[in-house]
Structure formats: structure tokens, C-alpha cells
Image (cartoon, rainbow, N blue to C red):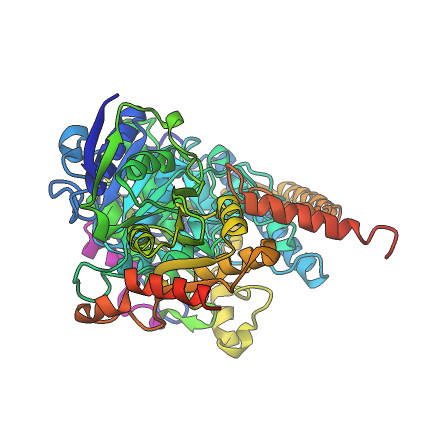
């Protein structure tokens, strides 16, 4: 799959979904049905070796396991909050694996799966959700921006970064750089996201807008954000949009890889709408039973991204029971390790309040730090 | 020596030019700043000389200007954004306060955002609404931002270069009604010859009372001091220059000598810069004060229709009235 030719330009490429179930499927690019059947697509055909399929399966299982562990850590009071990606593993693993080493990602606060596939230590965002720091990593060195909580704000940062990539002359060749901005269906209503579409279009920036349409913005359903399919909005901004089955890791990979390669070759932006479903709550503070019915959740359960890839692997005899057991066991070990590292995470030193406010310092912050230290010292021995 | 007489507007232009010559990562972004040279012509000729890649006419969306500038800064550029008028900065407020100001802190020092956001501010030009505002306190209140304002051609020329050279994000307030004021600037001097960016400065020494002002109100205060001298009162005028962080040392020194302080700004007084300065002077100079710190400011109303702005804006007479009240305490 890694040596696939960049796909040709297209506009709103779609095909009929193959799976049954209610409500009717929207038109989207699909390469693997919920029952594990491989289907061909005229524009997005990628050959995956058995090893590559097994690798994607391992990613999906591991990412879900780590996510489940983080939810458990929150329930036990070890994280302040957790934004689970349950159900969106294929969208994130497919997009993350489609990126090349030199590509840069701008995540929301839910892209734990993208982060994992970029080879970044999954512990990195947990300090944020534990309240130990506010991210704290180097976005440029990791090629993965800080999690952004303000909805849609990162799409403008991604666009500016992509404009910088073009200014640096890093587009137009196979080894050019591309940028990918993640956001959700709710974010498409934000002014920042629409401005990012305009900017990237008029400046022809090497960027892919990757919208995970998980059907809900906390409690508000998609129809409160849009009257047309999200991917169709791209046409109004002057670049192609494509909808992909977000629970099909193969299709997400193929579509994202093609869009990123188009960007790096200097062909401008693409909007990808990964049509998926948030199986869990918006965050651990949310109660989805107040706004959606269980039959809807069950219908999506039948389109599970992991089950369909497992069915394919079994059908093609690309993996056996030993492999699946081993993947589960490895994921379990990784989750245990994550748990242990979260539990041993030290609380930050008080003085960190005053660190890194300014690059060149500030007499006001310095004075307050001194006052604070003197105040804290006044308790020593006394309390 | 190559001292020239420049307007504040032209001095900003020469300062921007120097910064662009010094560092090819410096890029300008804003509405109408290219061929037109900006509605106040501050970027006049720069696109012609540095090209469209470095002087970028942007779409008309302020959040987009600031948000994409953040991305360019992450990529290693030093963007200088022009917000066309003070009242148009609010669509970018989220990007400035949530993103620009906090990026370094959230990244635990891993990110440096060397960006400048230029904002022509204040009234006195007979404009329609949203073109005469003084929003500096919103930004001075926000940790992570540095905020400055120039009041003379010399400061305009050097402070804009210093702001661009700074590794911290700087909100740069330009006194739009003073753009056409002239003064000497030695453009042959380098930045090391200039006063530090975040320093306040005595611009007229005096002995009887202290006036603190910044931006467009420095000239008003100097005029008031000239008038007061005719009545035998010696006013010391301090130009704050930096609104965040404040450089209070020269203010304390002055108040300890004069015992009286009047703070002047166009922005409404309620919860404004004057309140902060008053609080700090009260803490540091309590036993030197002969009278409470007084403020002369815009009123706590929306900025009025332009035919009322002469009454709304602090002027020489209102400054002298406050000085009289201080002496009458």
C-alpha cells in the first residue's frame, strides 16, 4: 500500500455503500464492507499485503484497548476527563497511517489514534487529561500539534503552517510535505473552519481537511449543523470533497493517502468527510442516553471497524487465532503499562504556574513568582 | 548621523522595511496592505519591493489573519499582522487570547510565537463607529501577550522593529490620529541604540505633578504641561510605551518627587490601565502621595458619534482640570 500511485483529481467521488441496515447508507467510498467483503472502487484501489492488513488490525485493536484503559482510569479518578475515540478507530488509524513521515497533523482533543500511529508515546496526552500539564509536547518536532480544545481553531493554524510549507518550496514533488487538519462535524459550523477553507483555497495550500463526522456534537445531531452532506461544502470553496466510510480503515487509508499526495504535489486542498459514529459519550462527563436511542447505537455496532477487518483476515486466511490472541495480549500489556505510568505520574511542582508564560520573561511574572515562593515558604514547619 | 524628519506613519514604514531587510522570515499580512499600502499607507511600497510572498493581501477575516499567522510562526516565520481598525480586532479575539497568548505556556516552552499584531487605535479622526476604539486593556489583561504603544516617530521606527525581533507575541497599538505628527528619527541607528521595548520614559521633566500617558495622549499631556508652565506649574510627563508589562520604576520615582499623579488615556476609565497604575502607585508610593491618583479617560459609554468625540476624548483642559483637582485636595 505504501507505494500506491497518487490518485487522480476528482470531485465529490462517491459510490453506493454496500452494507445493509437502517437508515440507508449515504454514498461514500468503501473498500471493505461491514461483513468483511473487499470491494473495488474505480478511483481508490489500493493493494494491501497480508502483513499490512495485520498491521492495521493490530493498530485498531491497540488503539481501542488504550482508549478503553483511559476511560477506566477516568472512572477510577485518575484522569479528570477523557474524550474517548471508541468507534472512530478506523478513521484515525487510516488517516494516521496514510501520512508520510514528513507530514504534519493538527489534531482536536480526540485524535489519540492518529497520535499512536505517528509513533508518538500514547502517554503524551494523558498528562493533559490528568491535569498535570496542558499538553506540553513539542508540536513541530513531533509533527503533531498540541491538542486543541477550542473547536476548529486548529484548522487555521494548519492552514498557516501549510502556507509556510509552500513558501519553503516543499511542495510539487513526491517527497513534498503535506498538512492534515482534524475536526468534527460540529466544528464545520465554526467561522474559523470556514475561514480555513477560504484561506487554503485562495492560497492553494498543501492541506487535507479531515472531518470525522461522528454524527453528534456532544448532544446535537448532524442536522443541527448542516442541511447538505459535509463533503459537498468543499465545492463552494473551490476544492474537491470526498466522503469515505469512516469505519473502513482501508478506504480511509486510500482516500487520505491520495488527498495528502495531491497536496504535496501542489494540487491544493481536499476535504474528506469520514462518515463514522461516536460509540461512546462525548467525554466521560457526558450522558448520551439523554439524546440518542439504543437502536441507533446497535445499528452502528454492526459496522464495527475492527470486526470487519478481522472477518477479512479470517476469510483470506491472512491471520489465525494465534495472531488475534497475540494482538489482544500485546495490547493488554501496553494498556497495563500505560496505567502504571499514569499512576506514577508526579504532580507538577507548584512553581510551574509561573513557567513559560513568556519567551523573554516578564518582570510582573517574576515578581509574582517570588511573592508566591515567599508565601509558600511561610508555611514551612508551621503547617 | 542620518537624522530625518518623518511622520509617525512613515517611521513605522521605515521600521517595517528595516525589519524585512534584516530577516527574510518577516512577512506582513493584512487587508489592503499590498498595492494600496494599507488604508493608512503604513505598508506603502513594501509589496512592490519585497513581493507578494512577503506582503500578503489576505481575505477579509481577522480570525483567519491571526490564526494562519500562528501556523506560519510554528513553521518558523515572523508574521506581522495588520488589523485595519481597532474595532475590527474582535473577530480575532479568540485566536489572540486562547491561542497566541497561551501557546507557549501550553507547550511548556516548546513553542515560540514571534508575531506582531499591529492595531491603529483611538479616536479623533471623525470616523464612523468601530473606527475609534481603545481596546488595549483587553490585551494587557491577558497573560502571554506583550502590549506596547508608540507616541513619536522615533519610537515608531524603533519599537516596531523591536516588537518584530521579540520572541514573544506583541500587540502593537499605533496612535492613528498622530500618524501625521512629525519628528526627528536617526534611521542609521541600529536597535541596540534604542531604549528597551518594555521601558517607560520621562518625556518632559517637571517637579509639581506627574502625568502618565501613552499613545495619542502623550501629545495631549505634553500640550497640557506647556500650558501649565505658563501658569507656573511644572508637570512631569511620562510616556508608558509598554502597557504589558508595565515599567513602573520611572513612575514611582516621579511620584515620590512630585506627590501627585494624573493618568490619562482615551479608553474608558472603568477597569482600565489607569486603575492598575493607580493601585500600584498607591501600594508603592503611599506615603509620598499628597492627593489620590486621578484619572482622565474616555467615558464609560460606547464610543460616541464623531461629532461628539471632542467632548468624549480627554483633552488639554480636562488634563489641567485634573491637575487643579489634585492640587486642591
Residue A225 among those drawn in magenta: yes
Q: Residue B9 location, x and y as percent?
A: 21, 42
**What residue sits 73% from the left and 48% below the top?**
A374
- For the residue pair A207 and B249, the one nearer the viewer reads as B249
**What residue sits 29% from the left and 60% below the top?**
B316
- For the residue pair A177 and B65, the one nearer the viewer reads as B65
The answer to whether any part of residue A259 appears in the image is no
Q: Which segment did they paint magenta?
A: A223-240
Q: Quadrant of residue B125?
A: bottom left
The answer to whether any part of residue B113 appears in the image is yes
Rendered position, A162 above or below A248: above
Rendered position, B323 above or below B235: below
Q: Residue A215 location, x and y as percent?
A: 41, 66
**What residue sits 34% from the left and 26% below the top?**
A175
- Dividing the image into 4 quarters, which one contains the N terminus of chain B? top left
Rendered position, A294 above or below A230: below
**What residue sits 67% from the left and 60% below the top?**
A74
Left of B122 or right of it: where is A328?
A: right
Amino acid at each position: 500500500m505504501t507505494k500506491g500511485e497518487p490518485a487522480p483529481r476528482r470531485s465529490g467521488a462517491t459510490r453506493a455503500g454496500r452494507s445493509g441496515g437502517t437508515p440507508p447508507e449515504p454514498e461514500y467510498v468503501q473498500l471493505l464492507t461491514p461483513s468483511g467483503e473487499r470491494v473495488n472502487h474505480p478511483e481508490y484501489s489500493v493493494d494491501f499485503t497480508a502483513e499490512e492488513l495485520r498491521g492495521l488490525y493490530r493498530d485498531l485493536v491497540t488503539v481501542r484497548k488504550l482508549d478503553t484503559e483511559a476511560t477506566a482510569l477516568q472512572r477510577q479518578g485518575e484522569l479528570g476527563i477523557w474524550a474517548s475515540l471508541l468507534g472512530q478507530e478506523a478513521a484515525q488509524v487510516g488517516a494516521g497511517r496514510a501520512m508520510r513521515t514528513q507530514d504534519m497533523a493538527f489534531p482536536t482533543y480526540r485524535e489519540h489514534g492518529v497520535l499512536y500511529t505517528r509513533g508518538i508515546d500514547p502517554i503524551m496526552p494523558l498528562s493533559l487529561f490528568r491535569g498535570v500539564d496542558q499538553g506540553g509536547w513539542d508540536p513541530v518536532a513531533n509533527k503533531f500539534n498540541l491538542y486543541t480544545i477550542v473547536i476548529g481553531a486548529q484548522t487555521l493554524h494548519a492552514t498557516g503552517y501549510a502556507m509556510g510549507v509552500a513558501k519553503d518550496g516543499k511542495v510539487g514533488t513526491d517527497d513534498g510535505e503535506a498538512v492534515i487538519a482534524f475536526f468534527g462535524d460540529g466544528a464545520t459550523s465554526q467561522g474559523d473552519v470556514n475561514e480555513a477553507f477560504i484561506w487554503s483555497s485562495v492560497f492553494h495550500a498543501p492541506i487535507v481537511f479531515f472531518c470525522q463526522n461522528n454524527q453528534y456534537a456532544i448532544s446535537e445531531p448532524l442536522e443541527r449543523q448542516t442541511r447538505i452532506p459535509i463533503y459537498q461544502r468543499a465545492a463552494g470553496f473551490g476544492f474537491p470533497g470526498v466522503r469515505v466510510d469512516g469505519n473502513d480503515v482501508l478506504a480511509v487509508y486510500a482516500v487520505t493517502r491520495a488527498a495528502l499526495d495531491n497536496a504535496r504535489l501542489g494540487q491544493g486542498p481536499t476535504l474528506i468527510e469520514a462518515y463514522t459514529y461516536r460509540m461512546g459519550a462525548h467525554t466521560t462527563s457526558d450522558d448520551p442516553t439523554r439524546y440518542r436511542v439504543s437502536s441507533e447505537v446497535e445499528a452502528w455496532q454492526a459496522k464495527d471497524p475492527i470486526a470487519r477487518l478481522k472477518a477479512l483476515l479470517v476469510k483470506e486466511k491472512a491471520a489465525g487465532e494465534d495472531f488475534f490472541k497475540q494482538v489482544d495480549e500485546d495490547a493488554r500489556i501496553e494498556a497495563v503499562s500505560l496505567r502504571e505510568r499514569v499512576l506514577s505520574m508526579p504532580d507538577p511542582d507548584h512553581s510551574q504556574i509561573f513557567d513559560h508564560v513568556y519567551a523573554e520573561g516578564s518582570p510582573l511574572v517574576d515578581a509574582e513568582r517570588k511573592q508566591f515562593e515567599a508565601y509558600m515558604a511561610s508555611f514551612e514547619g508551621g503547617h | 548621523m542620518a537624522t530625518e524628519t518623518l511622520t509617525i506613519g512613515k517611521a513605522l514604514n521605515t521600521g517595517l522595511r528595516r525589519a524585512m531587510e534584516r530577516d527574510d522570515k518577516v512577512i506582513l499580512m493584512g487587508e489592503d496592505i499590498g498595492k494600496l499600502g494599507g488604508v493608512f499607507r503604513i505598508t506603502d511600497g513594501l509589496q512592490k519591493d519585497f513581493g507578494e510572498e512577503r506582503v500578503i493581501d489576505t481575505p477579509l477575516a481577522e480570525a483567519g489573519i491571526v490564526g494562519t499567522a500562528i501556523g506560519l510562526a510554528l513553521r518558523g516565520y515572523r508574521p506581522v499582522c495588520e488589523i485595519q481598525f481597532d474595532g475590527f480586532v474582535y473577530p480575532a479575539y479568540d485566536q489572540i487570547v486562547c491561542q497566541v497568548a497561551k501557546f507557549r505556556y501550553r507547550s511548556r516552552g516548546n513553542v515560540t510565537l514571534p508575531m506582531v499584531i499591529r492595531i491603529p487605535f483611538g479616536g479623533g479622526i471623525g470616523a464612523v463607529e468601530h473606527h475609534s476604539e481603545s481596546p488595549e486593556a483587553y490585551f494587557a489583561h491577558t497573560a502571554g501577550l506583550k502590549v506596547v504603544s508608540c507616541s513619536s516617530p522615533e519610537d515608531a521606527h524603533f519599537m516596531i522593529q523591536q516588537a518584530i525581533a521579540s520572541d514573544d507575541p506583541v500587540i502593537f497599538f499605533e496612535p492613528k490620529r498622530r500618524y501625521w505628527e512629525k519628528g526627528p528619527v536617526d534611521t542609521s541607528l541600529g536597535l541596540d541604540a534604542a531604549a528597551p521595548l518594555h521601558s517607560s520614559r520621562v518625556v518632559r521633566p517637571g517637579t509639581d505633578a506627574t502625568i502618565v500617558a501613552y499613545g495619542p495622549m502623550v501629545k495631549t499631556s505634553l500640550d497640557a504641561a506647556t500650558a501649565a508652565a505658563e501658569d507656573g506649574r511644572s508637570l512631569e510627563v511620562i510616556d508608558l510605551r509598554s502597557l504589558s508589562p508595565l515599567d513602573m520604576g520611572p513612575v514611582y520615582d516621579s511620584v515620590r518627587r512630585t506627590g501627585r499623579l494624573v493618568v490619562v488615556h482615551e479608553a474608558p476609565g472603568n477597569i482600565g490601565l489607569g486603575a492598575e497604575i493607580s493601585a500600584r502607585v498607591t501600594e508603592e508610593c503611599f506615603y509620598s502621595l499628597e492627593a489620590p491618583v486621578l484619572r482622565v479617560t474616555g467615558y464609560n459609554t460606547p464610543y460616541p458619534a464623531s461629532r461628539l468625540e471632542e467632548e468624549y476624548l480627554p483633552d488639554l483642559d480636562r488634563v489641567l482640570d485634573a491637575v487643579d483637582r489634585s492640587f486642591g485636595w
